Amino acid sequence: MDELADLTETLVAIPSHEDETAAGDAIAEWLRAETDARVDRDAVGNVIAYKGATDDPDADTLAFVGHHDVVPPADRQTAGDGNAGDYVVNRRDGRIYGRGAADMKGAVAACMLAFRDAEPPAGRELAVASFVGEEVGGTGARHAIDEGFVPDRAVVAEGSTDYSKPGVTDVAVAHKGRRASTLVASGTAAHASEPAAGENAIYRASDAIDEVRGLDAPESTVFGERVSGSLAVTMVHGGETWNVIPERCEVTIDERTVPGDRADIGRAADAVEGVAWEVDQDLPPMACGDDAFADAALAAAREVHDDLGLDAPEHVVKPHATDAGWLAEAGADCLVCGASEPGEAHTDTESVGIDVLERCYRIYRAIADRE
């Protein structure tokens, strides 16, 4: 499918790590030129298009969801200085190389073509959405949700690394979330020659860390499989000079949350005098609540794989958070299915297999057309 590879190259070449405007313009212009869909561009730069039963108040909405922002490129991935020059794109040996090829402009291109070509059954509204700000906490997805974008079901075509087996496009029915938080220990400064005259914030932080080490990591069950989160202290910062009892110490905690469970980090703050708990970022987990949707998507994926002579895909759990978490929290039933290949996303040699994108396109079309 040369059209898919060409569209991927066009999107990948457009810088979008600091300003997603040009990439969003290209997506919106293509949708207006290639489809009869209603194409909306919101205040933050999201692109959302609808077709099918758009005037039916009882229509059920299926959305293909991606994002066109990317992480900052390596020097070798730019033809100029940051957003002043296009990204470098190369096609060789059946792959497209460039920042955002895997995560996730290739999958966005597959969604756009599947949206154009699909013939959804009566009573189904089909949408395609490409968000900004996914790489910085889902700012675009949250804005779209606040403005009313909550489809009944969504296939999030995330291209991040390592949730599918090599050579297979699996269907993720759940993913972990991430909560980043800080325990702030406050004390009283004093000269280090008289430690009893102060309250050592580092000691208080150490006591709080011991409490964290005793907490259970979150766990859940999704589609009969145990999903285990994690909890780890990742940074400690306290004190300003060698001869002063520190009056402040901060402890950074990385927690991978799971659907329905979180660690009781607040208990560590409650247990130690002078310690407060602050949540810095909370990316929600996701679990698909519609078994029929999950099974139908897997059946569609298996038909495509069987037709191509490939090993059968499976329901899997993705270890990383995506915009599916925000959509699920708002009430959409979500799955994640995209061009996930080992060791590609966010690397300075990022690439995507053209055959993988074509497989994704066929899966998305099959899901959209299914009764």
Image (cartoon, rainbow, N blue to C red):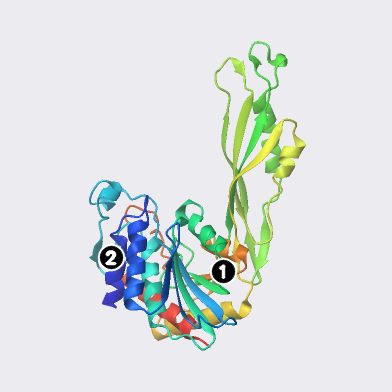
Q: Position of residue 334 (x, y in %)?
A: 56, 70
- Vertically, is 245 above or below 346? above
> Between 73 and 216, which is closer to the camera in this rendering?
73
Q: In screen coordinates, is 290 left or right of 61?
A: right
Mark 1 and mark 2 residues within 8 Å of each other at the beta carbon? no
Residue at 31% over, 75% down: 33
Q: Which image quadrant: the N terminus? A: bottom left
Q: Position of residue 313 (x, y in %)?
A: 49, 76
Q: Which mark is residue 150?
A: 1
As helix, strand or loop, the secondary structure at mark 2 comes to: helix
> Between 307 and 292, which is closer to the camera in this rendering?
292
Quadrant in which residue 44 is drawn: bottom left
Quadrant in which residue 292 is drawn: bottom right
- Vertically, is 82 above or below 224? above
- Vertically, is 364 above or below 348? below
Q: Position of residue 269 (x, y in %)?
A: 72, 38
Q: In screen coordinates, is 286 left or right of 268?
A: left
- Can you see residue 321? no
Q: Residue furthest top?
A: 193
Which amino acid, mark 2?
Answer: Thr
Using a 10 Å C-alpha cutoff, classify the residue at mark 2 as few (fewer than 14 neighbours), some (14 to 19) or many (20 or more).
Answer: some
Q: Which residue is mark 2?
A: 10
Q: In screen coordinates, is 88 left or right of 156?
A: left
Quadrant in which residue 45 is drawn: bottom left
- Can you see residue 80? yes
As helix, strand or loop, the secondary structure at mark 1 comes to: loop
- Vertically, is 366 above or below 150? below
Which amino acid, mark 1?
Answer: Val
Using a 10 Å C-alpha cutoff, classify the residue at mark 1 as few (fewer than 14 neighbours), some (14 to 19) or many (20 or more).
Answer: many
